[in-house]
Amino acid sequence: MDKTVNQKAWFLVLPVFAVVAFSAILPLMTVVNYSMQDTFGNNQFFWNGVGWFKELLGPSTDLGSRFFASLWRNLFFSAVILAIEVPLGIVIALSMPTKGWTVAACLVILALPLLIPWNVVGTIWQIFGREDIGLLGYVLNHIGLHYNYVANDIDAWITIIVMDVWHWTSLVALLCYAGLKSIPDAYYQAAQIDGASRWSVFTAIQLPKMNRVLLIAVLLRFMDSFMIYTEPFVVTGGGPGNSTTFISIELVKIALGQFDLGKAAALSLVYNLIILIVCWVFYTVMTNAGIERPQKEGVA
Amino acid sequence: MARIDLVDLAHSYGGNDAAPESFALKPISMTWRQGGAYALLGPSGCGKTTLLNLISGIVTPSRGKILFDGVDITLRSTRERNIAQVFQFPVIYDTMTVGQNLAFPLKNRGVPKVEVDKRVAEIARLLDLTADLKRKATRLTADAKQKISLGRGLVRSDVAAVLFDEPLTVIDPELKWQLRSKLKALHRELDLTMIYVTHDQTEALTFADTVVVMHDGRVVQSGTPAELFEKPAHTFVGYFIGSPGMNIIAAEVKGREARIDGHTIALNCGYDALPAGAKIEIGVRPEFVEVAAPTAGLLKAKIDRIDDLGRIRFARVRVGDVKFAARVPGRFAPSEGCVGLKFDPANVHVYADSRLVEGAA
Amino acid sequence: MHTIPGRRIIMSLFLIFLLLPIYWLVNMSFKTNSEIVSTMTLWPHHPTLQHYVRIFTDESWYSGYINSLEYVVINTVLSVSIALPAAYAFSRYRFLGDKHLFFWLLSNRMAPAAVYALPFFNLYSAIGLFDTPWAVALAHCIFNVPLAVWILEGFVSGVPREIDETAFLDGYSFRRFFLKILVPLIASGIGVAAFFCFMFSWVELLLARTLTTVNAKPISAIMTRTVSAAGMDWGLLAAAGVLTIIPGALVIWFVRNYIARGFALGRV
């Protein structure tokens, strides 16, 4: 569809721009402001230039070491959950029933974890994993595995990962399902006629057609997992020690716990910048992938 | 290459116990000649796609049998039937090149590489795709993609029949003509059984040796284009084929005469044994009705307009309430709104309950 | 051909995996606290409604749900209404900076809430909206408005331009065309956008907690109050949790056919 050039369209966009700018730019300005200043309290600020950033990005300082440690934790976490959730989501999408009332039933149950407030998700798993009152903790400990997410680093990590898989795989599955449903029957019929094996149908037809939604799913999951805060906070509070302290948890600790405005602001900006860069990369890849593909095959 | 026999084949999407009238395909038995070029012609919903899908195996019939060369393949899967089907929109494998697309069906059947390359090159040559073999299939135009779809069907040397489901729907008009000619040439060269489903009579009449006209789940008539044109077995065929279609009007028929609106027309044959209580109509193609100056001996009609198609002119007239089309001869120019109609008795047919009645000579 | 072998088992196992922790929560919500800490039972041996009764009768508890609902509804209505004209603009027109604006909007969807916690705290205190549902509703606009614009733009693009042009030719003013013609055509898109806005606002915790203290406290903040001298009030916590799942479950149940249909249409 051809779009006409019309600068008056800005009027239509103005409310959106105003609201989002108000929520985004103003606070960001404060953040930038704080990031370059230091205070002795009593609302007296003096210029610190890039001092905070130097401290943040220097691995030997306290702030810097905390930042890099939490950065690695975030990257590791995102990598692991992507490696689990994307293939699992695809498998679930392929396992959806094809017709009947079971379709709606599956969709409802799949969507359920997505609609639970994140703190309740944390609470559910916090309870579930405890040995005394939680089914999982009880069963694991009774069959001989010593499982304690409060005291043991690895157990804490496993709990958080399983919780995220429980929470978000459905999103990947639903997106992939939407992509799969859009494939016209004729493709499968042609594959039957061509004598294609089940695996070929997957690699030659289904996977390519799911390209776009997979990219969206990976983008969303990477972003959301990189920014994760509530669920791990409720379950482990960042511990034991700081083994599960992600960047966001670190940031909130510094900002709202210590009220260390300058450091918090600098960390915020760097955090935001990382996300922006990844987002931009994905966006460019996505729009270019759209350009490469020619006009959709005509359907009568 | 196969002779295809349909034995009492019927299908209902609502299951075998559905009401007989609701069947998408009512019981039909017919034979498709080996190496024949057939067109399945009919309006949307007449069952032609259902019939095609039954032959290819995409749909399993509620009732009846299908035989390929005498072998009952009704319950065999699509893969085992060795047919090829080209769909309404091009179906290609996005991630593969043109060459890989064409090779795909052979690779799946374990054909050795040397043989695969040979066949692919041959089919590519037939379809003028040789230049594009290394290009990614998604980048080609719609008609090239349809050729790839077709090629995937032809590349298997044991293919029994090629089925087409309105394959030119998404092709540009100029390219439609080219592709149609290419299909006809391929048919002559490869001597395959080809069944072509369409709702466009021009496509059907130019492609096929035998046209099978369907209506409401039934085969109404099957014959050469000439037969369909000159002697439609059903009023629907008469109306559907030809542009403009056959004129159909209620009449009283007795002996060798038909009475319409109080006016008598002579008929070529005698019709004495017409079924009682049936709806009697006569049908005559506009090409065989002439307009003339209104005289007492001719059936009267009011002119709506005259369509000038260049080499022939048709007058759209009205007999009472019924719309009629008739040829305007030579220089004839109607003076007032009324004309008389002259009928060629040799080409006036009688229909009872929409079916052709054979008269006695 | 569409599906994989063993899909019934895979699906069943996964659905059980999803339902098990929820079932456990529901199970606990009907148990007394003494039963919870003393035994491990698969269903309540002495079932009780005491926790639910407490929540429904104690104002400090049910006000939490009401507060949460308040800002979620405000946010959903606000986000969708301002996103509609913007989605139309992005779909139909090219204008100066449109691509950059769209990207900037999307990037806000990806903003980490943690970054905004402190600045919002200062901002909303400064303008006196702190501790009101409006603060949370406006704060959530950062992610919900771009999301709504993104979803709605897709649906508006699905409506052929010819419809706009016909309407204008017929003499419709822009406002009338928008409200009487366009909106009904993308009704399912509005539903999807409203659903996602509702969902993201309902589940978000960090900002909702940061921007409220007493009056507008959401249920998520109140749930942290379950520690007392007698130890953690697990049953109460569980009941509160179950009640937060219910709106979500109800919403999906009612839109399940739209979701199934929407997927069948091939529109993500």
Image (spheres, coloured by chain):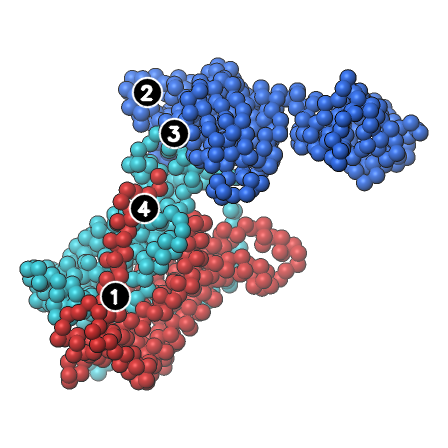
Q: Is mark 1 on a helix, strand or loop?
A: helix
Q: In the rendered image, which quarter is residue A206 located in? A: top left
Measured as percent of width and height from the top left, residue B244 is found at: 72, 31
Q: Distance between the residues labelled 2 and 3?
A: 25 Å
What is the residue that sits farthest to the right in this orientation? B296
Q: Quadrant of the C terminus of chain B?
A: top right
Q: Residue B76 carries which label?
A: 3
Q: Which chain carries label 2?
A: B
Judging by the rendered image, the residue that carries numbered circle 2 is B116
Measured as percent of width and height from the top left, residue C100 is found at: 40, 55
What residue type is disc 3 on?
A: Arg
Is residue C130 toward the left or the right of residue B229 in the image?
Answer: left
Q: How far apart are marks 4 and 2 (CA)?
A: 32 Å
Residue in view at x 48 percent, y 15 percent: B191
Residues at marks 3 and 1, common chain? no
Is residue C171 toward the left or the right of residue C85 in the image?
Answer: right
Which of B268 and A3 lies nearest the eye of the viewer? Answer: B268
Q: In which quarter of the image is the N terminus of chain B?
A: top left
Q: Which chain carries label 3?
A: B
What residue type is disc 4 on?
A: Leu
- Rate crowding at label 1 as few (under 14), some (14 to 19) or many (20 or more) other CA atoms within 10 Å: some
Judging by the rendered image, the residue that carries numbered circle 4 is A94
Q: Mark 4 lies on which chain?
A: A
Which of A185 and C117 lies nearest the eye of the viewer? Answer: A185
Which of C38 and A256 lies nearest the eye of the viewer? Answer: C38
Q: In the rendered image, which quarter is residue A30 located in? A: bottom left
Measured as percent of width and height from the top left, residue C67 is found at: 36, 78
Dot in front, 3 or 1: 3
**Which chain gets the red colouring?**
C
Q: Point out the tag, 2 or 3, that comes first from the N-terminus.
A: 3
What residue type is disc 1 on?
A: Tyr
Q: Does the rendering let one see residue B261?
A: yes
